[in-house]
Image (tube, helix red, strand yellow):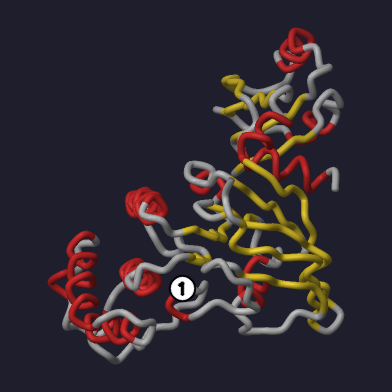
Amino acid sequence: MQNTVLRVKSLSKNFSSVKALNNISFSINQGDIFAFLGPNGAGKTTTLRILLDIIKADDGQIEWNLDGNAHRLPKASQIGYLPEERGLYLDIPILKSLVYLASIRGMDKTEAKKSALEWLERLGLADRAKEKLQVLSKGNQQKIQFIASILHKPIFAILDEPFSGLDPLNQELFIEFIREINNQGTTILLSAHQMQLVEKIANKVFLINKGEELYNGSMSEIYKTFENKKIIELHYKSALNENALKNFKEAENIEVIENSIVKLTFGQNSDLKTVLSNLAQLEGDFDISTHKPDLHDIFLYLVKNH
């Protein structure tokens, strides 16, 4: 049986008249890659900052248990934190900054330097170790921020928007790195809005919108819950007539993407033969494809029906 390393109960937070978090609860077990997902402004970063005592909750309880004993806050050496907003020293050489940050989290400086150089090599930045962070691109700054968050080999890592500023190739690279450190024993709490990336690596998911829980459970469970739904995509080659789609009442949800792709969600009771026949009557030149709902589709459905 896996040990629960973080338990959050009935967490709430208001900013003036805005309810940032409304009574959310979840738990994370040792070895999880727990995805905390939602759009910008959903309450993800607020939750993470409360967990680390950067800001205070109005109500709720938080219990950390990373070493077999319950604590309100974990030790600095046990936690790695990649913040949404970059927080490294811009005017200090990169290697020196990484070694310093690892050392204040309990890592031997010699070991920290060796490990930092290895990570810089893997990320293609070894030749820039003596440069200052401020001269790097946003994507490369994000790479350095990631190294800083995991260099001291924490028991638990909180990664807030880790894919920010990265191109698709480096996003895939980060997915592999997250898998790697998880396999080496680090439990991951991953906050993001790129659901198509996160669903590749997470085993549990918490979907949040406007501070409220939409879903909390395993990835396998959420797919099983929605396995009877079908997505039909229309890829338009000509002008899209959105007014015609509004009258398509058989669909549970209709999403238009960049005015060229239409995604229609249908429930298990829908007659797909009739649906396809009706779609063929729509104006315009388009291709049709079908698939089961992905995490993005499920999220939109849950938001609409919340």
Residue flagged by tag 1: what amino acid is it?
Gln
Q: Is residue 275 left or right of residue 187?
A: right
**Residue 48, how many percent across, how many down?**
61, 71
Residue under the point 20% across and 68% down: 125
Q: Nearer the viewer, residue 48 or 172?
A: 48
Position of residue 39 relative to residue 127, above or below, is above
Residue under the point 60% across and 23% down: 291
Name the image quarter holding residue 120.
bottom left
Position of residue 98 relative to residue 10, above or below, is below
How many numbered marks, from 0 up? 1
Task: Say few, some or many: other residues with alpha carbon within 10 Å of mark 1 (under 14 / 14 to 19 / 20 or more).
Answer: some
Residue under the point 76% across and 60% down: 25
**Residue 183, how many percent across, how many down?**
38, 50
Label 1 sits on a secondary structure element that is helix
Name the image quarter holding residue 239.
top right
Residue extending furthest toward the left? 127
Q: Nearer the viewer, residue 217 or 139?
A: 217
Q: Is residue 130 left or right of residue 235?
A: left
Residue bearing mark 1:
78
Q: Quadrant of the N terminus?
A: top right
Q: Nearer the viewer, residue 270 or 126?
A: 126
Position of residue 48 relative to residue 272, above or below, is below
